[in-house]
Amino acid sequence: TIDVTSADDKGDGADGNLVEEWDSHMEGFVPSTLVTFPLAPSTDEYFYEDVTDPVFVRGGFFASADEGETSSVDFHISDPDGNIVFVKNGKSEGLFHFRTRKQGTYSFILSNHKWMQWKKVTFTIGLGNDTTLQPHHVGSVEEDMGSIEKALKDIQTESTYLWIRQSSHMKAVESINSRVFWFALIEFLMLLSVSGFQVYYIKGLLCDQRVL
């Protein structure tokens, strides 16, 4: 029986959701194991974790390769009975998070099925849902309210600044448009006057020639 709460690579979403998944399930993650190692072509790398009591398991992997080459690897987790409880194939990175319900050894396998391409893989895992103690964890309600008030004031200040900035730009644009309009109007009147004078002058010359 599959005893995990996380989905396999068919339903866990696109890689673009990695940040959202980290925010949802990996906040305060403290790894018990964090290693970076080369993964040779056509080889598997195994990691084992012994579990005696139900525990929340979290972790992730990241694979890289030479520039211009694919960095995808296959990753799966099996329970003590050999059942596959998590699968992510053909990916360069991924996260996993689940609660164990069986005692024994869980296996974490990273596979490089390329024939001639080496991969550099970083793997991390942590047991339990412990988080590092942050200052805001022991802060008072007054401090939290002060932080919220400060954030709201920052938002109000930024909004006011952007509104004033936009308003100034609009006034400048309107002023430029007004100047362009009056300049075009004056230029049009001048051209009209010069054209009228030229017509009148040429007409006068033609009239004088007829008299002669």
Image: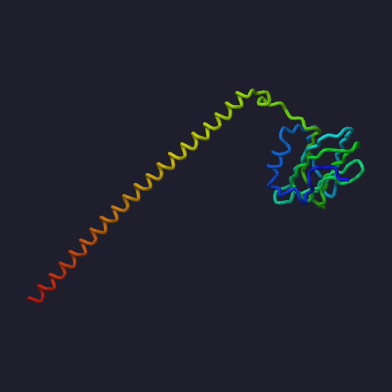
Residue 144 left/right relative to 163: right
Q: In the displayed structure, would residue 130 be above or below residue 77? A: above
Q: Is residue 193 left or right of residue 74?
A: left
* Residue for point 74% across, 51% down: 70
Q: Check the image and tell me how it is coloured.
A: rainbow
- Residue 176 spot, x, y in % from top left: 35, 48
Residue 208 quadrant: bottom left
Residues 135 and 71: in front is 135
Pinpoint residue 101: horizontal percent, then vertical percent.
Answer: 87, 38
- Residue 132 vertical placement versus 44 (above, below): above
Identity of the residue drawn at 75% across and 44% down: 94
Residue 54: percent from left, percent from top: 86, 34
Give whichever of 84, 110 is nearer the camera. 84
Nearest to the observer: residue 58 or residue 100: 100
Q: Quadrant of residue 53?
A: top right
Q: Is residue 23 above or below residue 41?
A: above
Query: Taking 144 as reference, is 62 left or right?
Result: right
- In the picture, the quarter occupied by the N terminus is top right
